[in-house]
């Protein structure tokens, strides 16, 4: 499986994510994930290992209630959402 930052989100989906951010005080990053042929996935993982992560951002520590709300929105939108600490990142 490969995941990338979700791009071109419909305004309604973006609005739902932004609404949850406001309500929880968390910063969320949306990822779109898809399965790859195992051979392609292996090659992609090798390239990514050489390149390394372009940005390291520490994860947030959501409460159980916040996590439940994130999971519900993930299910509704068909995306993976990751809560991160805003302002805590830097170039890798």
Image (cartoon, grey):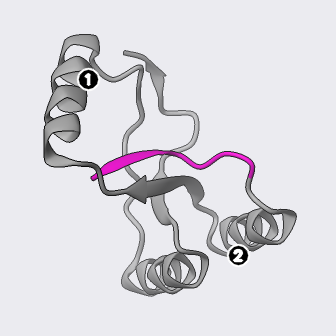
Q: Which mark is residue 48?
A: 1
Real-space CA distance between mark 1 and mark 2, rounded to the nearest whole angstrom = 34 Å
In the image, 37 versus 16, the foreground residue is: 37
Dot 2: what SS?
Answer: helix
Q: Is residue 8 above or below residue 41?
A: below
Dot 1: what SS?
Answer: helix
The answer to whether residue 61 is left or right of residue 38 is right
The residue sitting at the right extreme is 11
In the image, 63 versus 29, the foreground residue is: 29
Image location (x, y in percent) of residue 28 = 57, 56
Q: Which mark is residue 23?
A: 2
The answer to if 7 sits in the magenta stretch is yes
Report the span colored magenta.
1-8
Disc nearest the viewer among 1 and 2? 1
The answer to whether residue 59 is left or right of residue 72 is left
Q: Residue at x 47, y 28 (%)?
A: 89
Q: Residue at x 60, y 76 (%)?
A: 77
Q: Residue at x 37, y 83 (%)?
A: 64
Image location (x, y in percent) of residue 19 = 76, 72
- The image quadrant that residue 48 belongs to is top left
Image location (x, y in percent) of residue 87 = 57, 34
The C terminus lies in which quarter of the figure?
A: top left
* Image mark count: 2
Q: Is residue 12 above or below residue 6?
A: below
Q: Is residue 46 above or below residue 2?
A: above
Image location (x, y in percent) of residue 3 = 39, 48
Mark 1 or 2, nearer chain start: 2
The answer to whether residue 60 is left or right of residue 14 is left
Q: Which mark is residue 26?
A: none
Q: Residue at x 15, y 46 (%)?
A: 38
The crowding category of the residue bearing disc 2, from other C-alpha atoms within 10 Å (few below 14, some 14 to 19, many at least 20), is: few
């Amino acid at each position: 499986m490969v995941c990338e930052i979700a791009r071109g989100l419909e305004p309604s989906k973006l609005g739902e994510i932004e609404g949850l951010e406001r309500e929880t005080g968390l910063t969320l990053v949306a990822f779109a994930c898809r399965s790859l042929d195992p051979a392609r996935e292996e090659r992609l993982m090798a390239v990514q290992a050489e390149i390394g992560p372009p940005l390291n951002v520490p994860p947030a520590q959501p409460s159980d209630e916040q996590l439940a709300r994130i999971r519900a929105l993930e299910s509704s939108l068909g995306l993976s959402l990751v809560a991160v600490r805003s302002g805590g990142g830097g170039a890798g």
